[in-house]
Amino acid sequence: MARRNRGHMNGERYLANTSPSKREVHDLDNEKTNCQIDAIISAGNDKPYTSLDTARRDGYDNCAYCIGGSNR
């Protein structure tokens, strides 16, 4: 898969899913099919990040598929 330049994304490496039921961050350089990135963008739930640490500080959990170590 690849980084995106649509939705709110501008080629950033990390995409946070802002859906209240998800609140997880994805690594687009290690994207897996289960991440469903295109669906997140289509729903308007994408928030770009250039840093994983910043996304975590903002309260996003790791995606279990592309990052691992999810706290859920």
Image (cartoon, grey):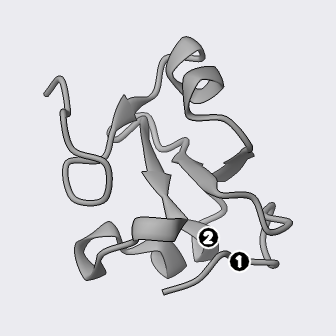
In three-dimensional space, the C-alpha distance between marks 2 and 1, rounded to whole angstroms, equals 9 Å
Mark 2 Cα within 10 Å, few/some/many (few <14, many 20+)?
A: some
How many numbered markers are drawn? 2
In the rendered structure, find residue 4 and report the number of the disc placed on it.
1
Q: Residue at x 46, y 27 (%)?
A: 60
Residue 35 locus on image (x, y percent): 33, 68
Is 33 displayed left or right of 70 in the figure? Answer: right
Residue 45 locus on image (x, y percent): 60, 54
N-terminal-most mark, 2 or 1: 1
Above or below residue 26? Residue 20 is above
Is 23 displayed left or right of 46 in the figure? Answer: left
Residue 69: quarter of image: top left
Q: Which residue is mark 2?
A: 41
The residue tagged with tag 1: helix, strand or loop? loop
Look at label 2 and name its amino acid.
Ile
Above or below residue 67? Residue 56 is above
